[in-house]
Image: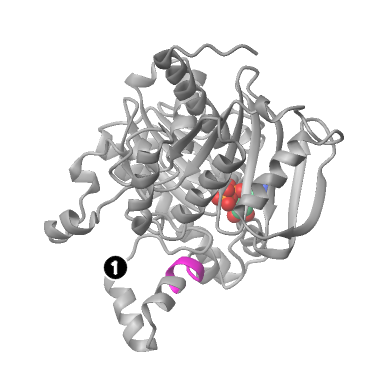
Amino acid sequence: MKILVLNCGSSSIKYQFIDTHEKVTLAKGQVERIGMSSAVLTHQPHGKEKIRIVGEILDHTIAIEYVIAVLLSPNHGVIKDKNEIEAVGHRVVHGGETFSGSVLITNQVMSALKENIELAPLHNPPNIKGIEAAKKHLPNTPQCGVFDTSFHSKMPPKAYLYGIPYELYKKYKIRRYGFHGTSHRYVALRAAEMLNKPYEKLKIITAHLGNGCSMAAIDQGISVDTTMGFTPLEGLIMGTRSGDMDPSVILYVMGKEGLTLSEANTLMNKHSGLIGLSGESSDMREIEEAVEQNVKRAKNAFEVFCYRIKKYVGAYTAAMGGLDALVFTGGIGENSCKVRKLVCDNMNYLGIELDDSLNENVKGETLISTNKSKVAVLRIPTNEELVIALDTEQIVLEQRKSTGEVKFN
Ligand code: ADP
């Protein structure tokens, strides 16, 4: 099935047009600076040169019109008719407690999505705009929502409840939700396939380390704990986010510096993490360069980053009562052998033994632990778009079956 996968942010839309049968991305690209006169559309058809178009794109509806137009373009396109887009899969950040799996988007689903806006005020509104825009241009094409949160929806209360008055959970749904679910699910499943072992029998820790970072403890196929919480701020040190800390710190700083709520929010989300600690960059490549040059603050940032991950490896091994596989993914997880090395250093007592040579020479999906290592350590490039496309395909096929609809191509 040919599926358009959309990831809509407030001023950008990333897209991939995927053939699920061949598991190949026929074209991919993004529209940036939506709402500005100098918006940019970058488009890359499979095996061809990337093209760049600059123009005025005032909103998501126009942006998606451009995306469809470029997919249809005689020179750079990959389809001849809009109907070749058989379904649209949308990445939706927050499904709250309502969505424990991917869904076909109906009017009822749209209402529920709108009810969840309060939980993700920055992310869900552009996701909703993207769905509405896609519906406008492709009114007869099924649309599905795949949530970042839903893979973690089976976490037990002991993992998702905070130690605050229970009434606050009941009243405002304040609990841990977790994010990056599609990525954690994808790499955990791939790990089981690579190890040729049943997914339902494995205890896996996945570390998605990108600009945003999170880890998940996946016991017998179920995410039983994850580091991100009510919002994607909790847990690991990230490019610009603080991760875990004593909540009193923020109250204290707000008092001392006279910060408003919004300023405090910006401090924690945009000026903390690697950039805050190092004062250099939020980009791990630049942090590593500064470490090479012995810049003390960059060294601190690098060590705090890796130490936090190491602590969670220990914590999640304890939570699951054992560990079979540790998976690294995301821009940092896939590319930084130094991060992987420091995280796994001195973990023999847990059965983790990295093979330095394999770790330094990774390519594609690679097992990077030694033959003796009880725990398999793997580097697996993530593919969230493929998960969204495959979920969408499954939902559409089920819907066709249940409505008795037969499609002739
Ligand atoms: P996002 O979370 O926005 O999808 P990515 O998964 O692309 O981000 O990850 C971005 C991070 O990956 C950045 O910190 C970047 O520095 C890091 N990264 C990319 N390539 C390398 C590399 N070769 N070595 C170390 N870090 C890298």
Q: Position of residue 212 (x, y in %)?
A: 50, 53
Q: Residue at x 17, y 58 (%)?
A: 171
What x and y, as percent, mark residue 175? Answer: 25, 52
Name the residue located 65 percent from the left edge and 46 percent from the top edge.
64
Say whether residue 193 is left or right of residue 82: left
Q: Amino acid at mark 1?
A: Asp
Is residue 133 in view from this perspective? yes
Q: Quadrant of the N terminus?
A: top right
The boundaries of the magenta stretch are 267-272
Q: Main secondary structure of the magenta part?
A: helix
Q: Is residue 128 left or right of residue 334?
A: left
Residue 101 magenta-drawn? no
* Other residues around mark 1 within 10 Å, as few (<14) / some (14–19) / many (≥20): few
Quarter location, residue 314: top left
- Which element is circle 1 on? loop
Asked if residue 362 shows in the view, the reply is: no
The residue that label 1 is drawn on is 246
Q: Quadrant of residue 380?
A: top right
Q: Residue furthest right?
A: 75
- State which quarter of the image contains the C terminus: top right
